[in-house]
């Protein structure tokens, strides 16, 4: 099969127990914006959308990530343990210097380092868990 019949990937959806918190993590990390209507409510107002489904887009409006609220979610225990990662995001940077700069940003935003191969001569990378426990990679590409 050489061409997909009218299909295109719209977005990646992450299950989470706190959709607003996880959306805020990726919004800050990747510089994305909320789909109109998904923005955080004013202080003291209820966050109905944040307890269900949120979408982040590029500034040009292309959907990127969505967050679906669930009651329970076993955190991935990768690279050891019984709960596999099942899906992860790959993010790239142009240099080891930028990999180190992004390490500081990820950590400050609440990401947790799972694996550090930043000294690998062929493919420097770090693997993190986001605040909900989803693994994601940042590598020099």
Image: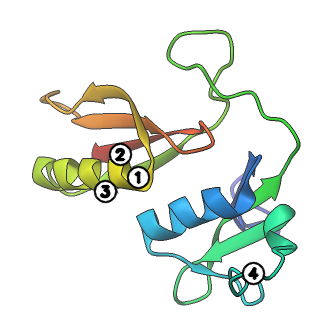
Query: For this rendering, which residue is in front, 11 or 84?
Result: 84
| Element marked by disc 1 | strand
Q: Residue at x 25, y 51 (%)?
A: 104
Is residue 57 among what the camera can see? yes
Q: Residue at x 54, y 80 (%)?
A: 58
Instruction: Measure the alpha-carbon separation of dots 1 and 3.
Output: 13 Å
Q: Residue at x 75, y 27 (%)?
A: 74
Q: For mark 2, does the 10 Å Cα neighbourhood hold few (<14), some (14 to 19), or many (20 or more) residues?
A: many
Q: Position of residue 55 (x, y in %)?
A: 71, 72
Q: Are marks 4 and 1 in contact (CB under 8 Å)?
A: no
| Element marked by disc 3 | helix
Q: Which residue is mark 4?
A: 44
Q: Examine the image and state in which quarter residue 117 appears.
A: top left
Please determine whether, in this image, residue 68 is positioned above or below residue 60.
above
Q: Position of residue 98 (x, y in %)?
A: 18, 56
- Disc ID at residue 138: 2
Please determine whether, in this image, residue 15 is positioned above or below residue 112.
below
Q: Which residue is mark 3?
A: 105
Mark nearer the N terminus (1 vs 3): 1
| Element marked by disc 4 | loop
């Amino acid at each position: 099969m050489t061409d997909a019949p009218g299909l295109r990937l719209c977005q990646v959806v992450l299950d989470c127990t706190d959709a607003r918190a996880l959306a805020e993590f990726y919004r800050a990390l990747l510089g994305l914006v909320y789909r109109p209507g998904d923005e955080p409510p004013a202080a003291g107002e209820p966050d109905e959308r944040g307890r269900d489904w949120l979408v982040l887009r590029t500034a040009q409006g292309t959907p990127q990530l969505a967050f679906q609220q669930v009651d329970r979610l076993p955190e991935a225990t990768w690279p050891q343990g019984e709960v596999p990662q099942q899906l992860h995001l790959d993010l790239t940077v142009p240099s080891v210097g930028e990999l180190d700069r992004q390490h500081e940003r990820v950590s400050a935003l609440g990401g947790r380092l799972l694996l550090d191969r930043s000294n690998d001569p062929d493919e420097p990378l770090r693997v993190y868990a986001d605040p909900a426990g989803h693994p994601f990679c940042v590598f020099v590409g």
